[in-house]
Amino acid sequence: MAALLDVQGLRAGYGRAEVLHGLSLQAQAGQVITVIGPNGAGKSTLLATLMGLLPAMGGAVRLDGEDIGRLTLEERVLAGMALVPEKRELFGSMSVEDNLVLGGWRRRRQAGWRDGLERVYDLFGRLKERRTQAAGTLSGGERQMLAVGRALMSQPRLLMLDEPSLGLAPLIVRDIFDIVQRLRATGVTILLVEQNARAALDIADHGHVLETGEVVLRGPAAELGADPRVIETYLGARKVACA
């Protein structure tokens, strides 16, 4: 089966400083792929490069077999990619619903556009309750839900999440990861970058361990979760339960 996302030999960085050194990974349609690793390993650089926010220095990125290396950010969104950044980057003075509408503005001429808004509200009931509330007044967990919902408004085939559990209480983290599993069940492919390695591996199909810009371990998530090297370095005794 051809991969929905196929990254081969990706090199990227800032100025002359190379951060990713020939990184390769694949994601099949409907899978959750996770990338774990320490701060500074290049995880956020990977997502920024895939989304077109940062130019690649080398290598190839294909989405559903098509080379997207020359596509702009807007063109990648239209091709079916969406990124939920670590800082969420919501419009705090605007309402929840206006933030969602902005996420789907490039799809507004398509039939069934408003159905997407209702699907987001079905997935995130709290957002529907707060649809007229300013985004800046939401709790941390609600802001993360809004950031994910806004990305879903573009109807992505590939959803990339950058540290979705960052700064959230354990119970909210569980809710966020439950939602990731529900999205996978709808056929959305998810690339999950996460420092909470155990929670990420618990729900992922495949995992990659990234260190200093290179993948040093990869394989089925269950196998990585049982690997002594991963346990010693990233897992320890901490665990966030995901239903």
Image (tube, rainbow, N blue to C red):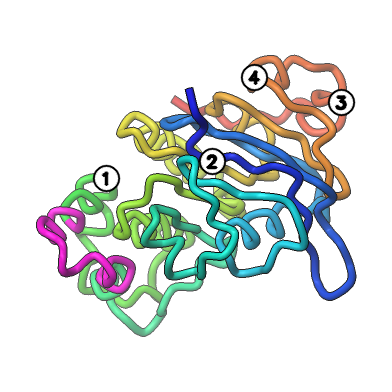
Residue 165 lies, with reference to residue 86, above or below; the image says: above
User: The disc labelled 4 sits on which kind of residue?
Assistant: Pro
Label 2, on which residue?
Answer: 5
**Residue at label 1?**
123
Query: In this rendering, would 111 be left or right of 104?
Result: left
Q: In this view of the protein, which residue sits in the foreground, 207 or 140?
A: 207
Disc 1 marks a residue whose amino acid type is: Leu
Q: Residue at x 65, y 60 (%)?
A: 49
Mark 1 and mark 4: span between their CA atoms? 28 Å
Q: Amino acid at mark 3?
A: Glu
Residue beneath label 4, please? 220
The region drawn magenta spans 101-117
Q: Amino acid at mark 2?
A: Leu
User: Do tag 1 and tag 2 residues touch (Cβ < 8 Å)?
Assistant: no
Queried whether the magenta region covers residue 109, the answer comes back as yes
Query: Residue 238 at x, y = what percent?
Result: 71, 30
Distance in Å between CA atoms under marks 4 and 3: 18 Å
Whichever of callouts 4 and 3 sits on the residue coming sooner in the sequence is: 4
Q: Nearer the viewer, residue 43 or 5?
A: 5
User: Quarter of the image holding residue 191?
Assistant: top right
Asked whether, in this view, residue 96 is left or right of residue 229, the answer is left
Say which element carries label 1: helix
Secondary structure of the residue carrying tag 2 is: strand
